[in-house]
Amino acid sequence: MDKLDKDGNRLPIKIDSTSNGEYEPIPVSAVNVQGNKLALDRATENAKRVGQSRRKFLVSSCGAASTLLAFNQANAYHQRNGGFFDLREESALDSHAANAQVAGGEFIFDVQGHYVNPEGDWLSRIPPDARPYAGMDKAACDAANSGGNRGYLDCLSESEFIKDIFLDSDTDIMILSFVPSTRENEPVTIEDADETRRIVAELQGSKRLLVHGRVNPNQAGDLEGMDELAENWDIAAFKTYTQYGPGGVGFFLHDDPGLAMIERARSLGVRNICVHKGLPFGPQSYAHSQSSDIGIVAKQYPDMNFLVYHSSFVAAVEEREFVAGAGRDGIDTLIQSLIDNEIAPNSNVYAELGSTWRFLMRDPNNAAHSLGKLFRYVGADNVLWGTDSIWYGSPQDQIQAFRTFQISQEFQERFGYTQITPELRRKVFGLNAAVPYNIDASEIRSLTSVDRVATEKLAYLQDPQPNFLTYGPKTRREFINLLKWES
């Protein structure tokens, strides 16, 4: 198996069943299958027309544009008119037209990234024959790396993380986050995260990587550990999982453990609480994955910021127009909580798009409702860019898809959704997150435009070699395998 796919069999916009490991993979629809096939057929034809190999064509901006246009065509067959990728047909063959639409110079601040330490101590605590995170393209990764039964984990290492994020995408800054786990079972520890930050800093990219501090306040020792995280590791926020806890029992933010965590963060001067909401792990403690508690604590602590990671999105729920009091799942639980507690748009609650946008790329109607509601009720200034990569490979395809996505005129008029303007895209891509994370976007851009990472990227782009791989579990079997060693 060729990791770099020199024959051009992988599309640059990756629509597949890959999960981030926190929710069971959902098979792609017949429309998605049709769109992927149509995109490969178009790539074959368009590559011939411009005199390129299919691989070279797919790596180009025309390849991305051609793929998105094929997805539009597949969705049009099924009269899905809520949203679409707004590209001109000539962008499939004209590089100038393609660059004008899928390329861009926005400040991109990705507030949720992950990787795995392939040699970490966590591996000593799982069965010798277990293959954690084995849902990636195992053949490609095994062929490209040595290491026996777990050589594929190198595809999730810090070096691959740095390449996928900073060379193969337009990302300027990323926050390295954590998965739900006990301290001893973390596939990336705070020490690992700090080491990766140091590696990036040695590339003169000292401002490019920030880190979270993971805390589950209902887990022994985590509340006490907040002091060390804040005082010794220069964390940008605390990250918590309200559905996670001893025996699979979670908590609400307004429960005693949640309030103790917020109070402690406040006393330590850390104003950002990042909380996983939506993307439920399973039926146990499901209510804690919903967002009824967000508005309550946001009202109680107006000086704190509550960053709702995944925006309370549930992959199995089809998003529709918000109806107050309807009691729906998903994003509506967040909106209802804000309304119930009189939290106005653009206040101290933020909605993050990690995994959410990746899934919404599959379904234009769902995407239009989800984004339209978030902009309307959470606020155009409070929707944050996140990708949950490296589970989905390089986030460049998510960036290109968002650069071109538009809510249809019909949905704007029927539901009061806003048009996605270039200004709104710039806000979502980075300017919004710069506020709670206290980042000076102009200063960062001036530094990152001349650091060693930028220099290496300039040379790399003379002959880019993206692999177009995704790494998370893709089937229910792979997902269950992941749960076994995490539990």
Image (spheres, rainbow, N blue to C red):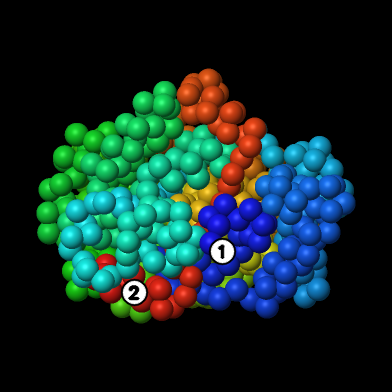
Q: What percent of the width, then of the height, locates residue 192?
A: 27, 43
Q: Find out whether the residues at labels 2 and 1 contact each other: C-beta distance under 8 Å.
A: no
Q: Nearer the viewer, mark 2 or mark 1?
A: 2
- Labels 2 and 1: the sequence-earlier one: 1
| Disc ID at residue 456 | none
Circle 2 is placed at which residue position?
481
Q: Is residue 286 above or below residue 88?
A: below
Tell me the distance, in whole angstroms, between the alpha carbons under discs 2 and 1. Answer: 22 Å
Q: Which quarter of the picture shows residue 101?
A: top right
Q: Secondary structure at mark 2?
A: helix
Instruction: Please provide percent x and percent y for residue 153.
Output: 36, 57
Q: Quadrant of residue 181?
A: bottom left
Structural crowding at the residue carrying mark 2, measured as other residues with C-alpha within 10 Å and reported as few (<14), some (14–19) or many (≥20): some
Q: Nearer the viewer, residue 271 or 22?
A: 22
Q: Is residue 123 above or below residue 429?
A: below
Residue occupying image coordinates x 32% and y 65%: 149
Q: Which residue is mark 1?
A: 359
Image-based side of 275 in relation to 225, left or right: right
Q: Secondary structure at mark 1?
A: helix
